[in-house]
């Protein structure tokens, strides 16, 4: 996991045919990697890390595949605007400290979070992305700490954040690690805080895997089950309206 990637909706790609359920997928990955998810040749996280280490730290890079003739700015701006509207719709949300988890090179931190929050921490697993984020956010007074670490292993401090932001990054976590992360994120919230999760969702009832970067396209039902397992309540949900029609549905969730 090192950035943010939008993707087309395959509706049950060839890799998913090997497994009747996502649980079977995780069992298979554990077996082939011999219990080492960071194995660069066959581990779930290792393969993904290799992919992201080769992606340029640019807006186009972190939104790989979503170029549509190179007019990337249009989709970036639409993404930011609808996320801003969603955040502002949570009327009782605080505006103090936030953290962008899986921030890539900081495109969302700069254009969405810094204008809304008094301090914005950045968590990213790829060093070249984090270094670019530091440069990209150098002129932002609200830029906070730049943390090199992985979502599944970096602890979040309790009762600290008014917003834990996670966009196009949950797809790279296993189910177990996503639940663990969400539980920890809940503990890190202030009384006015909430988790904002924005992620690709399958348009059908079948999950899909992107073999290029080990991104998992979950169904809405799978997300609902994971939120419940993490002890979270859905405060609000919405669908990104301005988005390429041939891409997966992009959903926004506010969770507490």
Image (cartoon, rainbow, N blue to C red):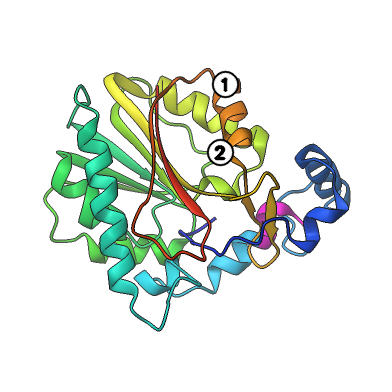
Can I make out residue 141 in this image?
yes
Nearest the camera: 178 or 219? Answer: 219
The one of 205 and 184 positioned closer to us in this rendering: 205
- Residue at the location (11% across, 50% down)? 141
Residue 220, percent from left and from top: 57, 38
The verdict on residue 92 being magenta is no
**Which label lies toward us, 2 or 1?**
1
Does residue 92 appear left or right of residue 102 in this picture? left
The residue carrying mark 2 is 153
Q: Which residue is mark 1?
A: 228
Compute the Cα span from label 2 to label 1. 21 Å
Q: Nearer the viewer, residue 204 or 2?
A: 204
Q: Residue at x 62, y 45 (%)?
A: 218
Circles 2 and 1, Cβ within 8 Å, touching? The answer is: no
Residue bounds of the magenta highlight: 42-47
Q: What is the quadrant of the N terminus in the image? A: bottom right
In the image, is residue 133 above or below residue 83? below
Q: Which mark is residue 44?
A: none
x, y percent for residue 215 = 62, 56
Helix, strand or loop for disc 2: loop
* Crowd class of label 2 (few under 14; some 14 to 19; many from 20; radius 10 Å): few
> Pointer 1: residues within 10 angstroms few (<14), some, or many (20+)?
few
Label the magenta part by its dominant secondary structure. helix
**54 relative position to 46: left or right:** left
Q: Residue at x 86, y 48 (%)?
A: 34
């Amino acid at each position: 996991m090192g950035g943010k990637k939008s993707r087309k909706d395959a509706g049950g790609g060839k890799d998913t045919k090997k497994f009747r359920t996502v649980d079977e997928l995780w069992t298979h990955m554990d077996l082939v990697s011999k219990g080492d998810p960071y194995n660069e040749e066959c581990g779930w996280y290792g393969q993904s890390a290799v992919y992201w280490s080769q992606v340029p730290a640019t807006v186009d890079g972190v939104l790989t595949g979503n170029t549509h003739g190179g007019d990337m700015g249009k989709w970036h701006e639409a993404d930011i605007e609808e996320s801003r509207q969603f955040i502002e719709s949570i009327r009782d949300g605080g505006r103090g400290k936030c953290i962008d988890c899986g921030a890539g090179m900081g495109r969302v931190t700069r254009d969405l979070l810094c204008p809304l929050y008094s301090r914005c921490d950045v968590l990213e697993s790829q060093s070249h992305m984090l270094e670019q984020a530091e440069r990209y956010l150098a002129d932002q007074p609200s830029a906070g700490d730049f943390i090199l670490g992985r979502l599944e292993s970096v602890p979040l401090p309790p009762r600290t954040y008014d917003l834990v932001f996670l966009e196009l990054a949950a797809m790279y976590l296993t189910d177990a690690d996503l639940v663990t992360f969400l539980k920890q994120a809940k503990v890190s919230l202030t009384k006015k805080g909430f988790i904002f999760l924005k992620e690709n969702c399958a348009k059908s009832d079948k999950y899909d895997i992107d073999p290029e970067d080990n991104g998992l396209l979950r169904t809405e039902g799978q997300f609902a089950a994971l939120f419940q397992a993490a002890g979270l309540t859905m405060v609000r949900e919405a669908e990104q309206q301005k988005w390429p029609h041939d891409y997966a549905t992009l959903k926004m969730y506010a969770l507490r």
